[in-house]
Amino acid sequence: MNSEQYAEFESLLPPLGSVPNLELFAKRLRVPYDVLSAAHAQAAQLQSWKNHISAKHRLPGLYKRYVSGETLAELACEAELPPCLLVRRFLELIPEAQGLKATHVLRNPKLLSSLPDGHAAAAASCEVPMPMSVDQQGLSAALLSRLQADIMEAAEWDTVSSPQADLMRSVLGQEYEAILAEKLRCANIAFFSEGRLRQEGFFKTPDVKLEVPVLMHGQVVTWIDSKAMFGSERYHMQQQELQYAKYLNRFGPGAVIYWFGFYEGLEDLHPDVLVLGDIPDSSDILQLRQLPLLD
């Protein structure tokens, strides 16, 4: 995705909490749907955490309004937070829910049925307390039922912070790591897996470390990291600091594969980190001959 396309993509993004028409955006930008969907998921996830920090002091007030009858969808859209993230924060404000894990509740809202009945009506008239603590706000049967229904609905369409979204990201990551391994085997490129490297005592490791360096598009590659996502400039620079720089210091030059495309220009940000969208064709890979060990 070039800079003009990405700038227009960012301008089209609706507030978090609403559902964008990604198919329409993809046609308008002339970008494959899978690429745009991955770019949106990444941008939404980053924005949700930024908004979460700025909205932290507003959470007690938002919960008070929810108790008074405003919908979860309306409040999530106003706060520009994914609804499941807003639910997590609301559960922290309910004294009776302190013993429950938010992830378990999001997966199974019926767990809320085990909570004792409270006096939710009092919450609408009490003063807004200090952030992250709402005193005297219990759960009436009516509020409990509404909260359960809202959680079920939010978990279905929240593509950013729902348990299903987390699971999909995890499964997708594992799937593309397996694809990377299979493509390397098909190209007869020997490698050590991340699990093997950790068994040998390495802590921060790429997904694969090549047994013998290769040349890809004329650049030396000793390791490859698989990213089942879109590579934005912001994300790539963040990962350069958190991961890639450590791999460079430990193993030498390497490559990162953004399987769902990347921002045009990432290739030029660091000379020792090759940015790819897939494993190159065999014609663009030069394998160095492994010399036999001397007796």
Image: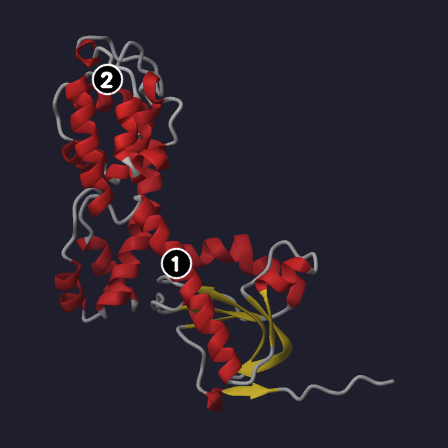
Report which residue position mark 2 lands on. Answer: 139
x, y percent for residue 144? 20, 23
Q: Secondary structure at mark 1?
A: helix
Q: Quadrant of residue 64?
A: top left
Q: Which residue appears at 22% of the width and 70% of the height?
A: 31
- Give the tally of numbered discs: 2
Mark 2 residue crowding within 10 angstroms, few (<14) / some (14–19) / many (20+): many
Front residue (pair 270, 206) = 206
Q: Quadrant of the N terminus?
A: bottom left
Q: Earlier in the sequence, mark 1 or mark 2?
A: 2
x, y percent for residue 197? 64, 62
Q: CA distance from mark 1 to mark 2?
A: 36 Å
Q: Label 1 sits on what residue type?
A: Val
On screen, residue 140 above or below 152: above
Q: Which residue appears at 35% of the width and 17% of the height?
A: 133
Mark 1 residue crowding within 10 angstroms, few (<14) / some (14–19) / many (20+): few
Q: Which residue appears at 64% of the width and 69% of the height?
A: 252
Query: Residue 217: in sight, yes or no?
Result: no
Report which residue position mark 1 lands on. Answer: 171
On screen, residue 106 above or below 208: above
x, y percent for residue 264? 35, 69
Front residue (pair 75, 235) = 75
x, y percent for residue 41? 29, 54
Q: Label 2 sits on what residue type?
A: Leu
- Residue situated furthest bottom in the rendering: 283
Front residue (pair 71, 251) = 71
Q: Is residue 42 left or right of residue 276?
A: left
